[in-house]
Image (cartoon, grey):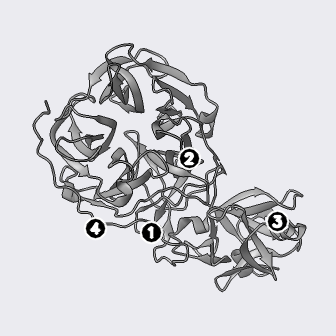
Amino acid sequence: MSLPLPRTGPVICPAVGSAPTGPRRLRSAVAAALVVLAVSAGLPVAGPAQAAPAVNYTNPLVNQRADPHIVRHTDGYYYMTATVPQYDRIVLRRATTLQGLATAAETTIWNRHTSGEMGAHIWAPEIHFINNRWYVYFAAGRTDDVWRIRMYVLENANANPLSGSWTERGRITTPWDTFSLDASTFVANGVRYLTWAQQEPSMPNNSNVYLARMGANPWQITGTVTRLVVPTYDWETRGYRVAEGPAVIQRNGRIFLTYSASATDANYCLGMLTASASANLLDAASWSKSPTPVFASNAATGQYGPGHNSFTVSEDGQSDILVYHDRNYRDISGDPLNDPNRRTRLQKLYWNADGTPNFGIPVPDGATPVRLRAHDLSGSYVRHYDYRARIEPNVTNLADSQFRIVNGLAGGGSVSLESTNFPGYYLRHRGYALYVEKNDGSSLFGNDASFQRRAGLADSAGLSLESQNFPGRYVRHRDGLLYIEAVSSTAERGSATFHSE
């Protein structure tokens, strides 16, 4: 029998908010900005805004690991847990760098029960450090009813969660004894909350997203339970009517809650809610919902079904990092839950000038891309528009301003800059003007698209790009466009210097 309906806030109004990206040809009107980060209660929180250096990771980070959760702890380690395709155990690994997680030894910290509850479908573990103890939140079914999914908690008092013993703290009790999963926790204004996904009786949805305060113990909730997300949009209801996998990041006086929607195939995507950090978070009216997904499949980059994300920070603490899973193919035979090939991936999360996150697109496999900011024009970046290379502010169509710096097509220690949203297209000069064009495999193209990387002509902390086949000519901006030209004056050296972000 279902338990009584709790007092809830109203369902989010569907027509509020907007996605942070636009069509490739749309010139946006919000300048990009980055932030310095800190870590509080296991979550990135707001810091003073400034340019953040580029990050360098290689995707995928870990194969066959879905629903990834990575936390950076005060001991200098990153801890990672994720769903394994066998759905039979909880694993944990740690490393001092994010990339190091790719090869870090993996420890099984808990195995499913052989009978009864917690005996099947071990899903979506998250690890949190609360009150000087480690906690793992996870979902599990029963051996005699594998779809009777509920949320459970493990506790470990050891400083290193890969050792010591894990105590089962039992099930998280919510107002209904129904399908529930994806518990996550965060602190805002000194209050710890639990957010999770659950099927609510009498509602025709697979799951909604909820929020409540945590009680005296981090496996209990107390007080009002607020319904935050009901899947109603087309992109939230493909295959299944799903809102799940909530994750929170706090920046710029606001709280952003991402969630995953639709079936776990190529339709899977991220939506987002936004609330003021000073608002009553248990009032659903405090939250606005983006009417379009903020992160979705991208055929050009070969990434499908990105979702179930978490957030962490870069090694230098200056960049937010989006952690998520996806597949590198669209078509799946049979139930997507039986397909083992969701992979853990990383990419930098950027911030718009209005203080909202810019997720961009799931970047191609391989090295993560960077943006090149002009030394002499704060907030202006190298980007392509109609395949012409330009320097512009307000590039909220993020992928237009992201490039992978790869080994030069012409060799000789050179580098080439590959477009993120047009893989196989490179920054090349033609008639001394720069374009983003498809590599035709010719030696001419290779030479035109190759540059020697030099210390910045106006600032040695930056970089300048000298043409491989026209030595003495550098990539520089002039009148909003990019050229390769000789530089001699202070102003010209400034226009030929960039900073990687």
- Residue kind at label 3, given as amino acid type: Ser
First in sequence: mark 2 or mark 4? 4
**Can you tell which mark lies on residue 330?**
none
At mark 2, the secondary structure is: strand
Where residue 26 appears, x then y in whole percent? 51, 77
> Which residue position holds label 2?
346
* Distance Cα–Cα, label 4 vs label 1: 22 Å
In x, y percent, where is residue 163? 48, 17
Amino acid, disc 1 = Ala
Mark 3, Cα crowd under 10 Å, few <14 / some 14-19 / many 20+, is many
Q: Are marks 4 and 1 in contact (CB under 8 Å)?
A: no
- Verify CB contact (< 8 Å) between mark 3 and mark 1: no
3 vs 4, front mark: 4
Residue under label 3: 450
Please indicate, yes or no, whether residue 318 appears anywhere in the rendered image.
no
Looking at the image, which is closer to me, 398 or 203? 203
Q: Residues within 10 Å of mark 4 (few under 14, many from 20)?
A: few
Of badges 4 and 1, the one in the foreground is: 4
Determine whether the residue tagged by mark 3 lies in a helix, strand or loop: loop
Mark sitting on residue 15: 4
Q: Is residue 412 left or right of residue 389?
A: right
**Which disc is residue 353 wearing?**
1
Q: Closer to the camera, 122 or 96?
A: 122
Element type at marker 4?
loop
Q: Quadrant of the C terminus?
A: bottom right
Is 451 rendered above or below residue 152? below
